[in-house]
Image (spheres, rainbow, N blue to C red):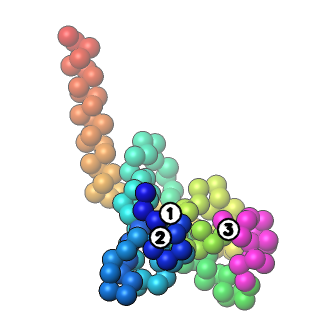
């Protein structure tokens, strides 16, 4: 396991600090402008088989933060207003945790903004569909034998 070279906690990615690329946690990632998250920490949404019709907007973290700043509230008071934990709000604002559809609905309602959008068909989704069709054909072949 990689440890953050600044504070010693579990590293979430790596970035360049004082000329050397070192493991860093999220908190210390601000010291490295080119910080990048390790692959295994990225969300793995492509694995989802059942696709909802709506998805949480990609820029949800920015939207949440913008509304909070517009209202002139700090995270503590804003989280209290939304009836969520401050740590949770921070994670949403930093894009570390993506709200579920239900959470995004509740948040959006409380904020007076829409955090959901209709799903757009993209390349990776098509790949998944082809993949499952192939699997279906494979099962059919297997049953015949
Ligand atoms: Zn750290």
Q: In percent of the image, x 62 and y 62: which residue is there?
A: 104
- Residue 86 is left or right of residue 140, and the answer is right
Q: In percent of the image, x 68 and y 81: which residue is there?
A: 68
Depth check: give the residue in front, 32 or 111: 32
- Residue 85 percent coordinates (x, y): 73, 65
Badge 2 density bin: few <14, some 14–19, many ≥20, Cα 10 Å: many
65 relative to 117, above or below: below
Residue identified by numbered label 2: 4
CB under 8 Å between callouts 2 and 1? Answer: yes
Name the image quarter holding residue 81.
bottom right
Q: In percent of the image, x 38 and y 63: which residue is there?
A: 38
Residue identified by numbered label 3: 87
Label 2 secondary element: loop
Name the image quarter holding residue 15.
bottom left
- In the image, the segment drawn in magenta is 74-88
Q: Which mark is residue 10?
A: 1
């Amino acid at each position: 396991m990689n440890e953050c070279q600044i504070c010693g906690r579990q590293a979430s990615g790596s970035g360049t600090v004082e000329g050397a690329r070192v493991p860093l946690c999220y908190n210390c990632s601000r010291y490295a402008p080119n910080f990048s998250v390790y692959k295994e920490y990225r969300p793995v949404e492509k694995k989802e088989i059942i696709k909802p019709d709506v998805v949480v907007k990609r820029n949800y973290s920015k939207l949440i933060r913008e509304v909070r700043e517009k209202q002139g509230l700090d995270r503590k008071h804003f989280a209290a207003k939304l009836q969520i934990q401050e740590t949770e709000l921070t994670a949403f604002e930093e894009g570390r945790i993506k709200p579920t559809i239900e959470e995004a609905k509740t948040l959006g309602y409380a904020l007076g903004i829409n955090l959901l959008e209709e799903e757009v068909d993209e390349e990776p989704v098509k790949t998944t569909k082809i993949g499952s069709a192939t699997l279906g054909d494979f099962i059919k072949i297997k049953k015949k034998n």
